[in-house]
Image (tube, helix red, strand yellow):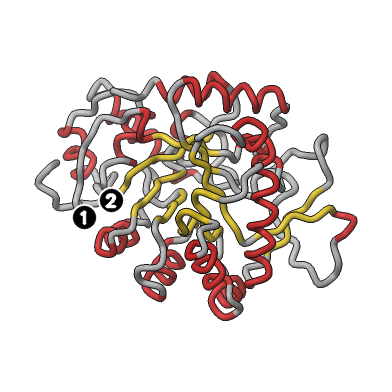
Amino acid sequence: LKLRPRAPSVSHLILGGSALGCLYEDISNEQAEATIRTALECGISSIDTAPWYGAGLSESRIGAVTATLPTVVSTKCGRVIKNSRSVSHKDNVEPGYVGHFMTDAYHSNVAVWDYSAAGIEEAFRQSCARLGRAKLDIFRLHDAETEEKWRQATEEGGVQVLQRLKAEGHVGAIGLGMNKADYVLRFLRTYPGVFDSVMLAGSWNLIDTDGLEVLQECQAQGVEVVNAGVFASGMLWGGAHYKYGAVPDEVRHKVQRWEKLAASHGVSLPAVALHFALLPDVVTAVAFGAGSPEAVKQNLALCGSDVPRALWRDATAAGLMPALGDASL
């Protein structure tokens, strides 16, 4: 894996929209708007979202602010949004929404997964409407990480619709937005040269480096990587969740070891996390989640920070990160 140690700058950062969809806590419309405007005022020019984030709420909030602005907005497909009263027994209602997204005060929508040609077309139509755009900058296949979802996307025309939308100019770029490295690799190797980018979520950070082979494959294919989940669901900022659940003891222990190492080199753990996220040369940007103006500023404060290269050597020796075999470290 080719590495390129670099100081993070605002140009590397993308505002992630999950918190704007009330992930874990109710975020008011006013607070969401203030968060988006703060990011834009601070120089962030790209925002990522998905129908899954608040069952359309995140997209609608982002659209309300950015529809007439030159902001680059990426969103995702594989889920269509329905009012709970219109759901039928034939619909594949996505589990895991209740208890994670706190949106009862805003709507009674649910997310229904559908990776078929018709599902991707409807997701495109809905996202355009919520975002207030006739075209989408970046459209990524989201969480197609079960055999049935894979089958729909590959055998029922989902990937082909993505290609057509790009070819016809309705979408600027297409990609994958996923958590599981094995499915990302499967898509990349089945469709070489098709996807412009991969948003790799939670698989290349201080806790989880399962995405190493994905980074190597993207490097070989010339596919850009946007690294998401780089603070391990907020754990590396002191949060209480890890991958949508409770924090396992082994994860907590690994965080403590990283904290000690960071302190021994005189740097903060979030700064180490952001630098690590940008170490691979193939990573062009990092997405961070924020649900308040303060959280935006907290992340932006990491820009320009420095992490000594000796820290990476010590982390490798301690078994905290894989031996990457790159002379730049």
The disc at residue 50 is none
Whole-number angstrom distance, CA of label 2 to CA of label 1: 9 Å
**In terms of secondary structure, where does tag 1 sit?**
loop
Secondary structure of the residue carrying tag 2 is loop
For residue 10, what is the image quadrant?
Answer: top left
Q: Is residue 13 left or right of residue 317?
A: right
The amino acid on which the numbered mark 1 sits, given as a three-letter code, is Leu
Up/down of 292 relative to 192, above or below: above
Q: Is residue 100 left or right of residue 319?
A: right
Q: Is residue 72 visible?
A: yes
| The quadrant where residue 131 appears | top right
Residue lying farthest to the right in this orientation: 85
Q: Is residue 150 above or below residue 239?
A: below
Q: Are marks 2 and 1 in contact (CB under 8 Å)?
A: yes
Q: Residue at x 47, y 53 (%)?
A: 172
Residue closer to the observer: 270 or 238: 270
Give the labeled residue for mark 1. Answer: 1
Which quadrant would the N terminus be assigned to in this image?
Answer: bottom left
Residue at x-position 74% and y-position 38%: 102
Residue 186 versus residue 103 in the image, above or below: below
Looking at this rendering, what residue extends furthest in the bottom direction?
Answer: 155
Residue for point 51% across, 38% down: 47
> Mark 2 Cα within 10 Å, few/some/many (few <14, many 20+)?
many
Q: How many marks?
A: 2
Identify residue for label 2.
Answer: 282
Amino acid type for the residue under numbered disc 2: Val
Task: Give percent across and percent down for residue 182.
Answer: 42, 67
Q: Nearer the viewer, residue 161 or 240?
A: 161
Name the residue: 62% across, 62% down: 78
Camera-side mark, 2 or 1: 2
Q: Is residue 146 above or below residue 302?
A: below
First along the sequence among labels 2 and 1: 1
